[in-house]
Amino acid sequence: MTPLRVFRKTTPLVNAIRLSLLPLAGLSFSAFAAQVNIAPGSLDKALNQYAAHSGFTLSVDASLTRGKQSNG
């Protein structure tokens, strides 16, 4: 067996590590720039509008945004 062949063998652990890193590869391609127009109002509504426009799922503790305002 040549030394290069040793590196071609994979174990279940190696495959699991490779599979766990796949989502990170996609992060470098997901950067984008967009203009978002959000009306002034409560911070929780502004964050919800931003998440809906961006396609993100946003989860925030309501006590952190309660009573806070956004300028838009």
Image (spheres, rainbow, N blue to C red):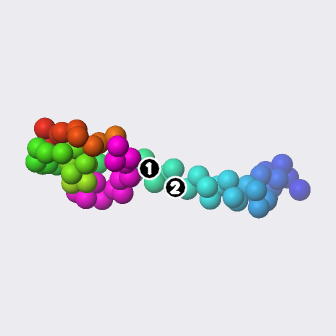
Residue 34 visible to the viewer: no
In the displayed structure image, the side of residue 43 where residue 18 appears, left or right? right
Picture quadrant of residue 49 = bottom left
Q: Residue drawn 34% across and 47% down? A: 62
Identity of the amino acid at label 1? Leu
- Can you give x and y, in whole percent of width and height, for residue 1 in the image? 89, 56
| Number of marks | 2
In the displayed structure image, the side of residue 34 where residue 6 appears, left or right? right
- Can you give x and y, in whole percent of width and height, for residue 4 in the image? 79, 51
Q: Are marks 2 and 1 in contact (CB under 8 Å)?
A: yes
* Residue 57 painted magenta: yes
- Can you give x and y, in whole percent of width and height, for residue 14 in the image? 73, 55
The front one of 19 and 5 is 19
Q: Residue drawn 79% across and 59% down? A: 11
Identity of the amino acid at label 2? Pro
Say above or below: 22 vs 68.
below
Name the residue tied to disc 1.
27
Say above or below: 49 vs 63.
below
Residue 69 visible to the viewer: yes
Quadrant for the C terminus, please: top left
Name the residue tied to disc 2.
23
Q: Say what secondary structure mark 1 lies in.
A: helix
- Can you give x and y, in whole percent of width and height, for residue 29 in the image? 39, 51
Magenta span covers which residues?
51-63
